[in-house]
C-alpha cells in the first residue's frame, strides 16, 4: 500500500518545479543591458555565444555568464530558410531556459534570469571558471 504522504510529497515537488519554471519566464519588457554590463566573450556555440558580464545593480558587481542567442541575421536569398533558422534558435532558447529553470542541483549551473529582446535572447547563469569541461 502507498502512504498518502508520498503522494502529497510528489505533488508538492511537481508544484514547486512548475512555480520555479514560471518564476524564470523570460523578461520581455526589461533589457539585459539595463542590469548587466557585458565584458568579454567566454565561448562560441552553434546557437550563440557566452559572455562574462557584471551585475551593475549591485555595489559589489558580481560576475555572471550570459548566453546570447542571436535572433536576427543579415537577409538571405532564401527567406523561408532564414525564418526556419531563426525559429529554431528561439525554440532552442526556450527549451534551454525551460530546462534550466526546473533544475536545481549543486553540480548543475544555476540560471538567474532570462531576457527576450526583439533581436536577441539571453540566459543569465552562474559563472563557472576553469575552462571547458571537455578540456579536463
Image (cartoon, grey):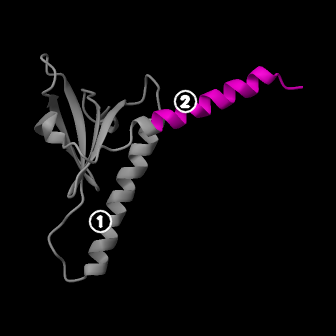
Residue with the most extreme bottom position: 77
Q: What stretch is highlighted in magenta?
A: 1-21
Q: Quadrant of the C terminus?
A: top left
Q: Can residue 41 be seen in this view?
A: no
- Residue at the disc numbered 1: 86
In the depicted structure, whether residue 88 falls above or below residue 79: above
Does 133 lie within the magenta span? no
Left or right: 104 as drawn, with respect to 30: right
Q: Is mark 2 on a helix, strand or loop?
A: helix
- Tell me the CA gap for discs 2 and 1: 32 Å
Q: Local crowd at mark 2 within 10 Å, few (<14), some, or many (≥20)?
A: few
Residue ID at (23%, 34%): 65
In the depicted structure, whether residue 5 falls above or below residue 33: above
For the residues carrying marks 2 and 1, which lies nearer the camera in this image?
Answer: 2
Residue with the most extreme right position: 1
Corner quadrant of residue 22: top left
Of residue 101 and residue 51, the one placed in the foreground of this image is 101
Point out residue 8 in the picture as x, y percentages from the top left corner: 71, 25
Of residue 102 and residue 67, the one placed in the foreground of this image is 102
- Residue at the disc numbered 2: 16
Residue with the most extreme front position: 29
Q: Is the magenta stretch mostly helix, strand or loop?
A: helix
Point out residue 18 in the picture as x, y percentages from the top left corner: 53, 37
Residue ID at (82%, 22%): 3
**Disc 2 vs disc 1: Cβ atoms closer than 8 Å?**
no
Left or right: 135 as drawn, with respect to 11: left
User: First in sequence: mark 2 or mark 1?
Assistant: 2
Does 20 lie within the magenta span? yes
Point out residue 119 in the picture as x, y percentages from the top left corner: 20, 58
In the depicted structure, whether residue 8 falls above or below residue 50: above
Q: What element carries label 1?
A: helix
Amino acid at each position: 500500500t502507498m502512504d498518502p504522504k508520498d503522494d502529497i510529497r510528489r505533488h508538492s515537488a511537481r508544484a514547486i518545479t512548475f512555480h520555479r519554471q514560471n518564476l524564470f519566464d523570460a523578461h520581455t519588457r526589461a533589457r539585459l543591458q539595463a542590469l548587466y554590463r557585458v565584458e568579454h566573450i567566454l565561448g562560441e556555440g552553434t546557437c550563440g555565444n557566452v559572455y562574462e558580464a557584471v551585475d551593475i545593480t549591485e555595489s559589489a558587481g558580481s560576475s555572471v555568464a550570459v548566453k546570447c542567442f542571436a535572433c536576427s541575421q543579415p537577409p538571405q536569398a532564401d527567406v523561408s530558410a532564414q525564418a526556419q533558422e531563426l525559429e529554431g534558435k528561439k525554440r532552442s532558447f526556450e527549451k534551454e531556459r525551460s530546462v534550466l529553470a526546473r533544475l536545481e542541483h549543486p553540480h548543475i549551473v544555476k540560471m538567474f534570469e532570462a531576457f527576450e529582446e526583439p533581436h536577441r535572447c539571453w540566459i543569465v547563469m552562474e559563472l563557472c571558471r576553469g575552462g571547458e569541461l571537455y578540456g579536463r
